[in-house]
Image (tube, rainbow, N blue to C red):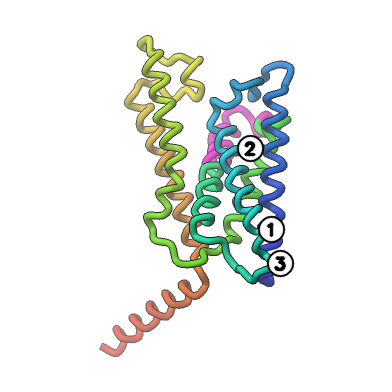
């Protein structure tokens, strides 16, 4: 794939992410009644699924605007600041996708997971964002610590989730606030679940970070490994 085709594909996918997420969120807000996976009105914004998709759409929109104004000047990669922004949006929506595919799908059935607006938030937007992120390359090699930014939104959501439940705690899980049932088995198990989600979030970001390294860096690493191996053989 040529560089021009790759950038055009990234741009197209990010535009579609913005469109599909906007369509799905507006559909949830304006829904006439609640359903199993849809909460109408502002209540929709309490779900990680919705918030992660919105963040992904916002980061994609920012990158789309940049690419539209800079695709003609020869730039081959997003500035590292925008790369981290895109990485963050894609990482959080990837958490949503993985939870749906591994936990919610088998538990409640995949047809339910991909019905109505959930089809766009659980499958289409995440997959488009993931493919775009894989195609993105870092302008300059990013340090490992840069991937920690991708976990910040999930940590903030976890802090708010815990705070709201602590304020309304009655000795057991309250489904009105413990919407995902993390505290069903108590605070200890709940803490383990939340921390695990943050770790998964970071591992996803780490994977994208490795895939996004400039080709020159990858070649340099291979060259170093090869040289090291030759030196050992010479010894």
Q: Position of residue 119 (x, y in %)?
A: 69, 36
Secondary structure, mark 3, is helix
* Point 48% across, 18% down: residue: 177
Furthest residue to the left? 235
Q: Quadrant of residue 118?
A: top right
The mark nearer the N terminus, 2 or 3, is 3
Residue position for label 2 = 122
Judge whether residue 182 can be spotted in this image. Answer: yes
Q: Give the image location of residue 36, x and y in percent.
A: 65, 21
The residue nearer to you, when weighing 180 against 19, is 19
Residue ID for mark 3: 5
Residue 164 against residue 141 in the figure, above or below: above
Residue 92 lies, in percent from the top left, at 52, 42
Q: Can residue 111 be seen at all in this image of the molecule?
A: no
Q: Name the residue under label 1.
A: 68
Q: Which of marks 2 and 3 is in front?
A: 3
The stretch of residues the image draws in magenta is 95-112
The reply to whether callout 2 and callout 3 are in contact (CB within 8 Å) is no
- Determine whether the residue tagged by mark 1 lies in a helix, strand or loop: helix
- Residue at 65 percent of width and 32 percent of height: 113
* 104 inside magenta stretch: yes
Q: Quadrant of residue 106?
A: top right
């Amino acid at each position: 794939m040529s560089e021009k085709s790759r950038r055009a594909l990234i741009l197209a996918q990010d535009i579609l992410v913005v469109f599909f997420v906007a369509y799905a969120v507006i559909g949830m807000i304006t829904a006439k009644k609640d359903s199993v996976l849809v909460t109408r009105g502002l209540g929709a914004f309490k779900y990680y699924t919705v918030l992660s998709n919105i963040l992904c759409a916002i980061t994609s929109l920012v990158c789309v605007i940049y690419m539209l104004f800079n695709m003609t000047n020869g730039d081959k990669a997003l500035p590292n600041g925008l790369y981290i922004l895109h990485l963050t949006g894609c990482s959080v929506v990837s958490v949503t996708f993985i939870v749906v595919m591994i936990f919610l799908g088998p538990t409640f059935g995949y047809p339910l997971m991909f019905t109505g607006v959930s089809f766009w938030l659980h499958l289409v937007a995440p997959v488009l964002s993931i493919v775009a992120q894989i195609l993105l390359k870092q302008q300059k090699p990013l340090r490992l610590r840069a991937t920690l930014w991708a976990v910040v939104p999930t940590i903030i959501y976890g802090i708010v989730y815990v705070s709201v439940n602590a304020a309304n705690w009655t000795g057991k899980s309250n489904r009105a606030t413990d919407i995902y049932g993390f505290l069903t088995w108590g605070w200890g198990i709940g803490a383990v679940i939340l921390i695990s989600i943050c770790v998964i979030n970071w591992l996803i970001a780490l994977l994208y970070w490795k895939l996004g390294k400039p080709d020159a860096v990858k070649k340099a690493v291979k060259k170093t490994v090869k040289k090291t191996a030759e030196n050992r053989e010479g010894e």
